[in-house]
Image (spheres, grey):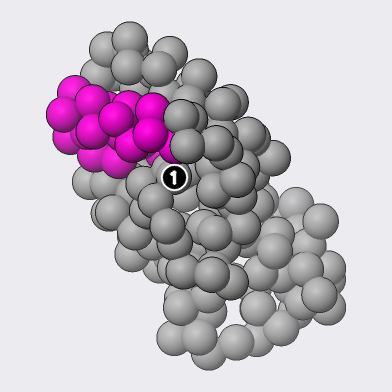
Amino acid sequence: MVSTDTLAAFNAASPEAAERDVLACCESGSFARRIVGGRPYRDPAALQDAVTAAFEVLTWDDIVESMNAHPRIGDRVRAGGWSAAEQSGAASAGETVRQALAEGNLAYEERFGHVFLICATGLSGQDMLGQLRARLGHDQDAERTVVREELLKITRLRLAKLLDP
C-alpha cells in the first residue's frame, strides 16, 4: 500500500524527478507522462486507478518499449536492481532449469519477437519455466493480452516499492 506521506512527496516532486521514478517502474514514456501528468493524486487508490487507466490505452509499441528494458528471465542481472530481486527464483534454480529457461527464452523470442515477460516475484525457476512453456502455445493475440497483464503486475509492484517508505 502506498503511504500518503510518500504519495504527497511524489505529488510534489518536479515533473522530471517524478517521470524518472515512474520510468523505473515501467519504461514506457507514454505511461510515465500519463501518470506524472495526472498528479496530484488524492490517495493511493486514485493512483492505482490512474495506472489501470494508463494501461488500458497503451499501444503495443508502448508495451514493447517497456519490455525492452527487461532482462531475459534467468539472465544474470545487476545485483541490487529490481530485476535481480524479482528473478531470484530463476537465479537460485538448478542448472537444468536455468538451461531450459535459456532455451525457452530463445524459442519464445523467435515465436513472438520479444522477451518473455512474467511477473517473477515469488515464483521459482520451475514455475517460470512452466509458464514459459505454456505460453509458447499461445497465439499472438492471446500472448499480447498476457504480456500486458504481466507488465501491469510488475508495474504495480514496483510502484508500491517506490512509494512505500
Q: Which residue lies at the image location 36% right of the left edge and 46% below the top edge?
A: 72
Q: Which residue lies at the image location 46% right of the left edge and 76% below the top edge?
A: 19
Which residue is at the front of the view, 81 or 163?
81
The residue tagged 1 is: 74
Tell me residue 111's x, y (percent): 19, 23
* Residues shaded magenta: 98-117
Q: Give the vertical position of 33 relative to 76 (above or below).
A: below
Tell me residue 122's x, y (percent): 69, 40
- In the picture as drawn, the residue positioned furthest to the bottom comes out as 14
Tell me residue 163's x, y (percent): 71, 70
Q: Is residue 50 visible?
A: no
- In the picture as drawn, the residue positioned furthest to the front comes out as 95
Q: Give the vertical position of 113 relative to 23 (above or below).
A: above
Q: Quadrant of residue 162?
A: bottom right
| Screen quadrant of the C terminus | bottom right
Which residue is at the front of the view, 30 or 141?
141
Q: Give the vertical position of 137 relative to 83 (above or below).
A: above
Residue 115 magenta:
yes
